[in-house]
Amino acid sequence: MSTLLDFVLHLDRHLPDLVAAYGTWIYGMLFAVIFAETGLVVTPFLPGDSLLFALGALAAAGGMNGVALYVLLAGAAFIGNAVNYTAGRIIGPRVFHATDRSGWIHRLLNHQHLERAQAFFDRYGGKAVVLSRFAPIIRTFVPFVAGAASMAPHAFMFYNAIGAAAWVGLCLGAGMLFGNVPIVKENFSLVTIGIVAVSLLPILIEWLRARSRRSAL
């Protein structure tokens, strides 16, 4: 875990080394990371926003192909959510409605994260698929919840495509515009923490609102 934390906080240093070591294979590795971060409910800890920001900065400096990154990673985000949604349709009802919470599925999944995603989905409906893209952890679980709630496949794919294109485009674009600004490069670990903190704000606000509603009852 400490190795993963060091990698996330110092992506600006590690990514060029990985590109030098693996060449074009790095694109496939990045596809796998974004796919897993969005498509597998057991890997919400993988870097998402900060990774895309760092990749944008690297692309702006000429270290990678920005267009190829956008097409590939937007595709990974879209496919990941689609797989997650399908898993939700297949096993979601069993997860949410089972009375026995000791089974292997419940041990594998974080039920608190699922409940937060359920509340987020209930509040925003189809738009949650787009909005959740910008909220770490929540974005990993909302597609699963959408599948469990039997959201219409065509509606999910529509919002999924918009969310994937917007998330990858905005994060990569921000990295291209600001990632190589001297003050950002010199304080990249702080910027990474800031990106995560800003991304978590919607979850914090929603939690505070829910807490205030419960205390008012």
Image (tube, rainbow, N blue to C red):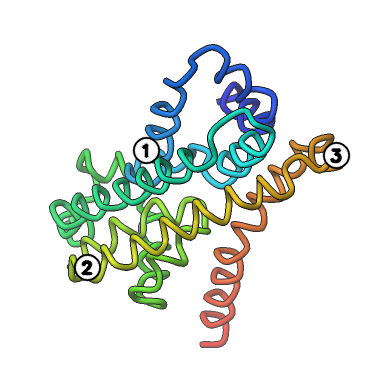
The relative height of residue 69 versus residue 141 in the rendered view (above or below) is: above
Res. 1 image quadrant? top right
Instruction: Quickly name the residue at label 3.
Output: 182
The kind of residue tagged 3 is Pro
The relative height of residue 214 versus residue 192 in the rendered view (above or below) is: below
Q: Residues within 10 Å of mark 1 (few under 14, many from 20)?
A: many
Secondary element at tag 2: loop
List x then y, in percent, for residue 158: 29, 67
Instruction: Quickly name the residue at label 1.
Output: 36
Give the numbered dot on residue 149: 2
Q: Give the camera-side residue of 166 and 208.
A: 166
The kind of residue tagged 1 is Ala
Secondary element at tag 3: helix
Give the numbered dot on residue 65: none
Give me the residue at 55% from left, 68% from top: 207
Please report whichever mark, 3 or 2, sits nearer to the chain's N-terminal start: 2
List x then y, in percent, for residue 74: 41, 48
Give me the residue at 65% from left, 52% from top: 174
List x then y, in percent, for residue 20: 57, 14
Question: How many numbered discs?
Answer: 3
Please report whichever mark, 3 or 1, sits nearer to the chain's N-terminal start: 1
Give the distance between the C-alpha atoms of the residues marked 3 and 1, in whole angstroms.
32 Å
Secondary element at tag 1: helix
Q: Residues within 10 Å of mark 2 (few under 14, many from 20)?
A: some
